[in-house]
Image (spheres, grey):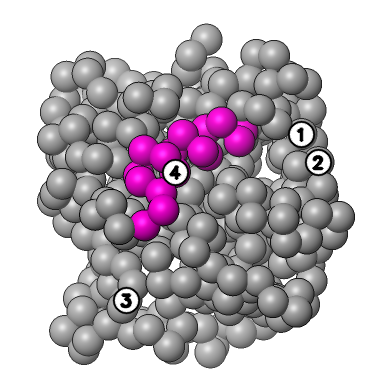
Amino acid sequence: MKLKLFLTFDHELPLGGVRTSWNDALFEPTNKLYQLANELDVPVVLFTDVLCGLRFKEWDLNNFYLPYIAQLHNALKLGNDVQLHLHPHWLTSRFEENRFFPSGDFSLSNFADGNRNHSIGDIVKMGVDFLQDNLKPSYPDYKCIAFRAGGYNLGEGVSSGLIIEALRKNGIKFDSSISKGYYFKSAISEVNFSNMPEIPNWYLNEEGILGKPESNGILEIPIASIPKSPFEVPTMFKMKKMANRAPANNGFQIHEGKPAGYAHKFRQLFSSRMLGFDNYTLSHEYLMKILDYNVRKYRNYDEVLLSVSGHPKSMGAYSFEMMKVFVNSVREKYPDTEFLKFSDLIK
């Protein structure tokens, strides 16, 4: 089996509000990510929150927008990748007295009914055009070809089909929004990846997120995951015990104060674990356990493409050290593994 890993990071502010500064909440941890990637000689992929950038062009040009664009350019300059991440609530959010107030339009599905100023197709095109217009003049080979949904929310039913159709029409060839077994619900979002194909990679089409295994549509490169053991200590208890590992608290979650019902909270207890660097209650040994699980599960396939996830805004010293040890452990245990960018797949 040939293993190909994509180190992907959602490049975004704390969506519920910032406690400190734009620099502390986003730019500085992303610069640290670049530095570590360079030391490890691996590329990273920024799934960048383009609608945030678009709104801040009018809200705070000098302090946010210009450094934001510079950080995207620097990603490509250093040999990394920049791809599409959409949090559509920015289009209906407010900005007053140097603070933003997020709306509840968290998912692209909220724009499926035609009752907003923008359609799903409009929003996807807006995001792709933003990246192409800002990056292609300096990097002529750049292409926006990959997508991660905000909050991993690819929609359901008709809205899911509309999202996938819009992505395909705008040149998106790869998606990395799905993590098998993941479940989450709040008052503004619900994600349910409990019934995904058994194969490691498959294609999304207008029929929905399941799609078909044929080479027709958008290739899904899921975030690696493992079923959660019923014997695991609940995360809320581990967070208290391991508080010394936590990064600086630079902002608020958009789901704070918008809880789901108790039945959904109980179900979330058994959501799968994603392979990622910003959960400080995990260890690099546990991350290797997740990867080992996937290697065993898909050992009979010729090629397996998987993502590892993270959020610079949620990464502190512990997370960066965990990433370093994980990458070195993968190289030692699975020496034929390739760490790739999405542009490598086109090549």
Circle 4: residue type:
Ile
Secondary structure under tag 2 reads helix
Q: Distance between the Cα atoms at labels 4 and 1?
A: 22 Å
Secondary structure under tag 3 reads loop
The disc, 4 or 3, on the residue closer to the chain's N-terminal end is 4
Circle 1: residue type:
His
Q: Which mark is residue 319?
A: none
Q: Distance between the Cα atoms at labels 2 and 3?
A: 34 Å
Residue under pointer 3: 186
Residue under pointer 2: 70
Residue 337 belongs to magenta span: no
Decide whether the magenta segment is chiefly helix, strand or loop.
helix
Residue under pointer 1: 73
* Label 4 vs label 1, nearer the camera: 4
Label 2 close to label 4 by CB (< 8 Å): no
Residue range of the region highlighted in magenta in the rendering = 116-131
